[in-house]
């Protein structure tokens, strides 16, 4: 499944990029992340819980930073996770990028997602809306984080 989403944030691209490349901070903005810790150079492990259709999933896995392009504000990641309880796994390569726009930035996610098990059986019709709502919540959390950080600095 291919995912291409874009969210506008009224945040300067340089400030947004600083958070995007700070993977532990970025992870705190993702709805459902329960724990997230570094496990070595460019590798992080964690747990995310969420409800997808009728299923409650608890994915445990790792994220590997494959490349960082500072000049183009682009980050490439690979994620792999499993939920042994419901017999599902997901593998994803994604590109996160920030693009300057008038009055702020576009935060873009391009992902190629492979799912197996019960989650995959739900089908694109249930998974796609969950991805969109999670991205909206993530953008709100990211904006709230940036606003709070700016208040503390100012």
Image (cartoon, grey):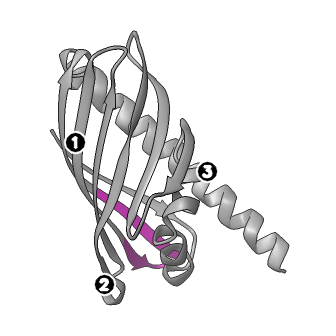
Residue 99 occupies quadrant: bottom left
Q: Is residue 102 magenta?
A: yes
Could you classify mark 1 by the number of other residues whose Cα lies within 10 Å: few (under 14), some (14-19), or many (20 or more)?
A: some
Q: Is the residue 14 above or below the residue 56 in the image?
A: below
Residue drawn 53% across and 77% down?
Answer: 18
In the image, taking residue 24 as reference, residue 61 lies left or right, namely: left
Looking at marks 2 and 1 on the same chain, the residue that comes earlier in the sequence is marked by: 2
Q: Decide which of 136, 50 is in the foreground and name it.
A: 50
Residue 114: x and y in percent read 16, 37
Residue with the mark numbered 2? 72
Q: Decide which of 69, 63 is in the foreground and name it.
A: 63
Label number found at residue 141: 3
- The alpha-carbon separation of the residues under discs 2 and 3 comes to 24 Å
Looking at marks 2 and 3 on the same chain, the residue that comes earlier in the sequence is marked by: 2
Which range is magenta? Answer: 98-109
**Dots 2 and 1: beta carbons under 8 Å?**
no
Residue 131 occupies quadrant: top left
Residue 15: x and y in percent read 57, 79
Residue with the mark numbered 1? 91
Residue 127 can be seen, yes or no: yes
Residue 133: x and y in percent read 45, 36
**What element does badge 3 sit on?**
helix
Could you classify mark 3 by the number of other residues whose Cα lies within 10 Å: few (under 14), some (14-19), or many (20 or more)?
A: some
| Quadrant position of the N terminus in the picture | top left
- The alpha-carbon separation of the residues under discs 2 and 1 comes to 25 Å
Q: Is the residue 116 above or below the residue 76 in the image?
A: above
Q: Is the residue 106 above or below the residue 129 in the image?
A: below
Residue drawn 31% across and 84% down?
Answer: 72
């Amino acid at each position: 499944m291919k995912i291409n989403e874009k969210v506008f944030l009224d945040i300067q691209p340089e400030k947004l990029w600083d958070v995007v490349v700070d993977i532990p901070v970025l992870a705190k903005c993702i709805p459902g992340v329960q724990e997230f810790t570094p496990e070595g150079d460019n590798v992080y492990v964690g747990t995310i819980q969420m409800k997808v259709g009728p299923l409650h999933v608890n994915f445990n896995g790792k994220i590997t930073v494959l490349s960082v392009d500072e000049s183009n504000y682009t980050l490439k990641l690979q994620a792999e996770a499993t939920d042994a309880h419901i017999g599902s796994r997901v593998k994803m390569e994604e590109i996160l990028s920030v693009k300057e726009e008038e009055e702020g930035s576009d935060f873009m996610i391009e992902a190629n997602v492979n799912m197996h098990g019960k989650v995959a059986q739900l089908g694109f019709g249930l998974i796609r809306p969950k991805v969109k709502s999670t991205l909206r919540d993530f953008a709100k959390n990211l904006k709230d984080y940036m606003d709070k950080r700016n208040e503390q600095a100012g």
